[in-house]
Image (spheres, helix red, strand yellow):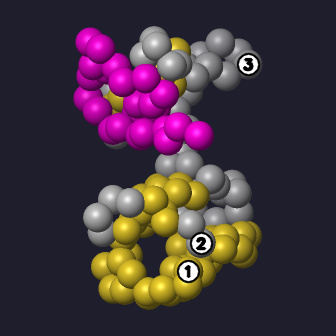
Amino acid sequence: MQEVKHYKVKVLPTNPRPNSVYYVKNTGETDVTTFITDLNGIPVPLIDQVGTIVGDKNYVHVQLSASNTWVIQHNLDKYAAVVIVDSGESVVVGDIEYNDNNKVTVTFQASFSGKAYLN
């Protein structure tokens, strides 16, 4: 399985990376266009059923202190997908419990610090 990379950018690159998600910040504070690239690097904007381009809600949780239990209040109002990386940017797998559509608890076998990417 190939890992999907996420990038927050101001302008979509000329040659986007294959199998990636780009969040392109437009002029407004919350105005973001989300593009997904296929295996050839061709970007496709996410479009809702009306045909307007929409961005997906996302949240990055920074866990500064090492812990084997991370409680993440993301307020995305959905059961978000969760990707955890340690301080060396390696993906870590844990047990995910969805407390509700705004909070998730992730439990690991060992304590560490890092980030959680939710979308």
Crowd tier of the residue under label 3, counting other residues whose Cα lies within 10 Å: few below 14, some 14–19, many 20 or above:
few
Q: Amino acid at mark 1?
A: Phe
Specify the segment rendered in magenta: 1-23
Residue position marked by numbered label 2 in the rendering: 94
Can residue 43 be seen? no
> Whole-Å distance between the Cαs marked 2 and 1?
5 Å
Q: Position of residue 4 (x, y in %)?
A: 49, 38
Q: Residue at x 62, y 53 (%)?
A: 81
- When asked about the image quadrant of residue 24, the answer is top left
The verdict on residue 105 being magenta is no
Q: Which mark is residue 1?
A: none
- The residue lying toward the viewer, choosing from 78 and 42, is 42
Q: Residue furthest front?
A: 1
Residue position marked by numbered label 3 in the rendering: 49
Label 1 secondary element: strand
Q: Amino acid at mark 3?
A: Gln
Residue 26 is left or right of residue 75, and the answer is left
Q: Residue at x 37, y 86 (%)?
A: 66
Q: Amino acid at mark 2?
A: Gly
